[in-house]
Image (cartoon, rainbow, N blue to C red):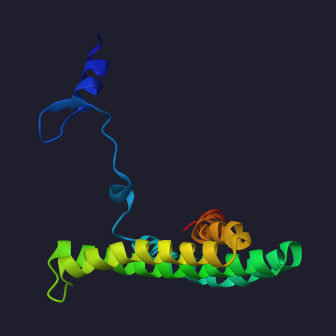
Amino acid sequence: MTPEIAASARARIAYHGYGLSWCPIEPMPDQLQTEANPAPAAAAERFYAGALHRIGRIMTVLAPLLVAAAWLRFGLRPAAGLAFGCAIAYVNFHWLKRVIAGFVDRAAGAATSQSGQGIVFRFLLRYFLMALGAYVIVTVSPASLNGLLAGLFLPVAAIGCEAVYELYVALARGV
């Protein structure tokens, strides 16, 4: 082994807390950011931090469009089921955000954190209310069940739209 290769091999061994391991020593992405120009990183952080808010807005735009399309294509009952499913999905998404924020506050030890029992109760209440809504739809109008199930996938469609938007912004603006 030549001295250059040996030096390179020694440079690639790093200490990872528990022992030595073989890994390439390259700067981590956060180490690549220089202190001279922190503005792009701050702009990217602000952009990506707004994803949950944008997903909520996308859901409010997609739901009426999808319900109108379902009404035209399948009729009133499936469209009503879709509208009910979209409403359940939106409320569920909103409550899930609040529950996760409560868990994070509780884990971080925030002074105004919610009680653990209240957080868990709301977490379980979401599922009970979704099951109750599905039961009502099935008993009142079984024809609306497909629309209800499709409506529950509204957050998936909104997240897909957000992913496409983030990809566009990353490629077009370099954020």
Residue 100 image point, x, y percent: 33, 74
Residue 38 image-quadrant placement: bottom left
Residue 94 image point, x, y percent: 46, 81
Evaluate whether residue 167 shows in this view.
Answer: yes
Evaluate whether residue 47 shows in this view.
Answer: no
Residue 62 image point, x, y percent: 69, 78
The one of 98 and 160 positioned closer to us in this rendering: 98
The residue positioned 68% from the left and 81% from the top of the image is 83
Outermost residue on the top side: it is 1
Q: Is residue 173 above or below residue 14?
A: below
The one of 90 and 101 positioned closer to us in this rendering: 90
- Pick the quarter of the image with the C terminus: bottom right
Residue 36 image-quadrant placement: bottom left
Q: Is 158 on the left-hand or right-hand side of 97? A: right
Q: Is 143 on the left-hand or right-hand side of 151? A: right
The residue positioned 68% from the left and 83% from the top of the image is 61
The one of 157 and 25 positioned closer to us in this rendering: 157
